[in-house]
Image: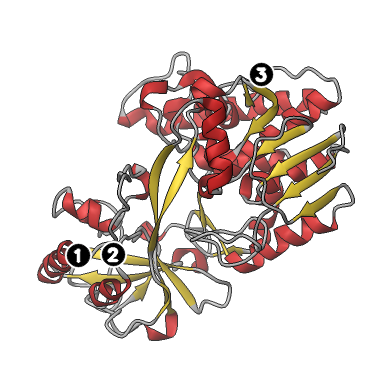
Amino acid sequence: MTIMKNTLNIIGGGMAGSEAAWQAANAGLRVVIHEMRPKVETFAHRTGNLGEMVCSNSFRSDDHEQNAVGLLHWEMRQANGLIMQTAEKHRLPAGGALAVDRDPFAESVTAALKSHPNISISYDEITNLPTDGNWIIATGPLTSGSLAKAIQAETSAEALAFFDAIAPIVYHESINMDVAWMQSRYDKGETEEERTAYLNCPMNKDQYEAFIDALLAAEKTEFKEGETAGYFDGCLPIEVMAERGRETLRFGPMKPVGLTNANDPENKPYAVVQLRRDNALGTLYNIVGFQTKMKYGAQKAVFKTIPALENAEFARLGGIHRNTFINSPTLLDEQMRLRSRPNIRFAGQITGVEGYVESAAMGLLAGRLAVAELTGKTLPAVPNTTAMGALVTHITGGAEAKTFQPMNVNFGLFPALEGAKNGRRNRKDRYKGYTDRAKLDWQAWLAQTV
């Protein structure tokens, strides 16, 4: 392979790789994206599109004043982020969340990158760590076995791993709407469409108890010898949650608060299963928070015990796959470069951030840092008062290396606000203070990168 000195090579065309390529190409760099799909497939991907969403179709909260991930959305928009631009174009009603029509979203990301004059795409599998040239490794949680072994050999460390589960998708026409009703929790949303963005399936106590019994008894996917079930707490399979206590699901994805059954308003549900629209046509609905490792036959049997889903037909059943990430606090410098090979940066979920948005954000940052290095500029550190800076600080040294695990962005990663009062009563003002400070600091940092 011929490597051009002034070209940025990016391995992986997921959220992080796509965003890194977009940022670098818009700054004038020549970029080559190396994507092994569709020649080399993975368990979770269905297409060869760049930016394909393999789990949920949600980028989570879009509230940039009270939510850390919403703030991250805001920061990425300020930086002309491709992922946020495209998400807005293919947005679906989801209450206060940013959910997208997944296939058109990925098709648009792919089209934007393919049509960019500074970007070319090579559909090849990179199996070794490059010895020369400028690289970003953004292969995500499904890094190919050969490259994972090369990374492990270079870092002299075991690749850390956890297991990620995918929720099933149901055809809307097969849902019994005489039982289910449309409502966002607490009627959240500015439009009627947003306030009725979720499909709700109610359960009484007996139905909930029977569901938990079926869930616990269902046949599960077995792990291979030598594998351990180190789950990320933000994406636990429902049966693992049920094993932690019979009421766990009722205080998690099945909580009945903020909802009134339009078909039976006098009776408050004991538990509620929510589904969120998964495509613009409204023909597909994703069962929210129902990641699972149950075998396919067991999934159909258990999920059909849910009221309104007794005749459900599934466009996709749930699944489980192995995710890998590196121990970034010990391996990466503050510029996201591999300490032993500074010509290589890492970005995205392989660095130990969790979630589409966080992965894309680290791609955005890695792309901009690579541009600065290749053009001879010196950038100040990203302020850790910003969502972007809080994340990169966490993975490049802020986290405890011995217990390092995947992390979503959250206000616990931000430095304290001077004079802010702690406690739940003061949380709204405190979060607004975090976001106001972050916005000023992020805009100031961006101004220095032009």
| Residue holding disc 1 | 215
Residue 341 appears left or right of 146: right
Q: Amino acid at mark 3?
A: Ala
Nearest to the observer: residue 249 or residue 55? 55
In the picture of the structure, the residue carrying the numbered disc 3 is: 381
Give the mark count.
Answer: 3
Q: Residue furthest top?
A: 418
Kindly report which numbered mark, 3 or 2, lies closer to the viewer in this rendering.
2
Does residue 309 appear left or right of residue 107 in this picture?
A: left
Is the Cβ of the residue at disc 3 closer than 8 Å to that at disc 2?
no
In this picture the colour scheme is secondary structure
First-in-chain label (1 vs 2): 1
Q: What residue did someone put label 2 on?
A: 294
- Packing grade of label 2 (10 A; few <14, some 14-19, many >=20) is many
Q: Is residue 270 left or right of residue 54?
A: left
Q: Give the residue displayed 28% in from the left and 64% down from the top.
A: 294
Which label number is shown at residue 53?
A: none
Q: Position of residue 28 (x, y in %)?
A: 88, 38
Q: Where is residue 22 drawn, in percent x and y?
A: 76, 45
Disc with the residue nearer the chain's start (3 vs 2): 2
Residue at position x 52%, y 58% in the image: 190
Q: If the image is split into quadrants, where does the C terminus sit? A: top right
How far is mark 1 from mark 2, CA to CA?
8 Å
Provide residue 195's location: percent of width, then percent of height. Answer: 45, 64
> Dots 1 and 2: beta carbons under 8 Å?
yes
* Residue 161 visible, this orientation: yes
For residue 337, above or below residue 189? above
Q: Secondary structure at mark 1?
A: helix
